[in-house]
Amino acid sequence: MMENIVIGFAIASLVFLIWRLMISSSSEPARKESMVIPPGVTLRPQPLLTDTDLMLYNLIRLAVEDHYLVFARVPLWSVVSVEAEGKVRSQVLRQIALKQLDFVLVHPGTKAAEQVVLLEEGFPPQPQEVTRTREIQAVLQAAGITLTTLKPNTSYTVPQLAQLLGVGEVE
């Protein structure tokens, strides 16, 4: 009887040690090799903004200059903090990973995004654009960030933009 207990304990200990070794080896960070640009690949800088986007950026900057810092082409994941455990957090980050915001208004004191400006694409909007906008809107709403949509081919004045962005004087 005592032999069976000792043998059982030895087997259980061996299984536990093997399990711990497998877990610790899989949790070690994988060694990453430094990135190498393959032969035949050429990289060049490209414009970040179109002429229309740059014009709107400058107008927005003038409209909110005393209230916000303005950033262009910001990834959605960089303006929200995703607080969740494990797979749920990864799933949310994957869903928002490739979404890009046209302009982000950041409060200089808190350094947090308070408003986002999206530019309407074409008219009528394509189904994938409608889906993208809805997903961005849902994330921003959940984070308490205001969303404003502008038409890129509309002429705006600085006071109009200031009022649309909530920093202008109400008439």
Image: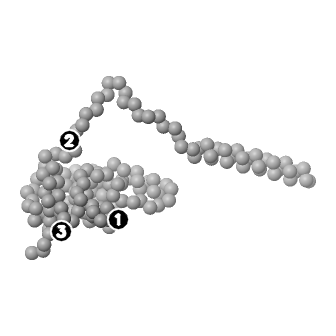
Give residue 103's quadrant in the image: bottom left
Distance, label 2 to label 3, CA atoms, is: 29 Å
Secondary structure of the residue carrying tag 1 is: helix
Q: Work out whether 35 lies above or below 15.
A: above
| Badge 1 vs badge 2, beta-carbon distance below 8 Å | no
| x, y percent for residue 72 | 23, 52
Q: Work out whether 72 lies above or below 63.
A: above
In this rendering, position of residue 35 left or right of residue 41: right
Q: Work out whether 50 lies above or below 114.
A: above
Q: Residue at x 13, y 49 (%)?
A: 52
- Viewer can see residue 120: no
The front one of 7 and 39 is 39
Q: Specify the amino acid type for callout 2.
A: Pro
Earlier-in-chain disc, 2 versus 3: 2
In this rendering, position of residue 141 left or right of residue 4: left
- Viewer can see residue 133: yes
Q: Which residue is mark 2?
A: 47
Q: Residue at x 16, y 45 (%)?
A: 50
Q: Which residue is mark 3?
A: 167
The front one of 162 and 125 is 162
Earlier-in-chain disc, 1 versus 2: 2
Q: Specify the amino acid type for callout 3.
A: Val
Of labels 1 and 3, the one closer to you: 3
| x, y percent for residue 53 | 16, 50
Toward the bottom, the furthest residue is 171
Distance, label 1 to label 2, CA atoms, is: 30 Å
Secondary structure of the residue carrying tag 2 is: loop
Earlier-in-chain disc, 1 versus 3: 1
In this rendering, position of residue 85 left or right of residue 46: right
Q: Residue at x 33, y 58 (%)?
A: 79
Secondary structure of the residue carrying tag 3 is: loop
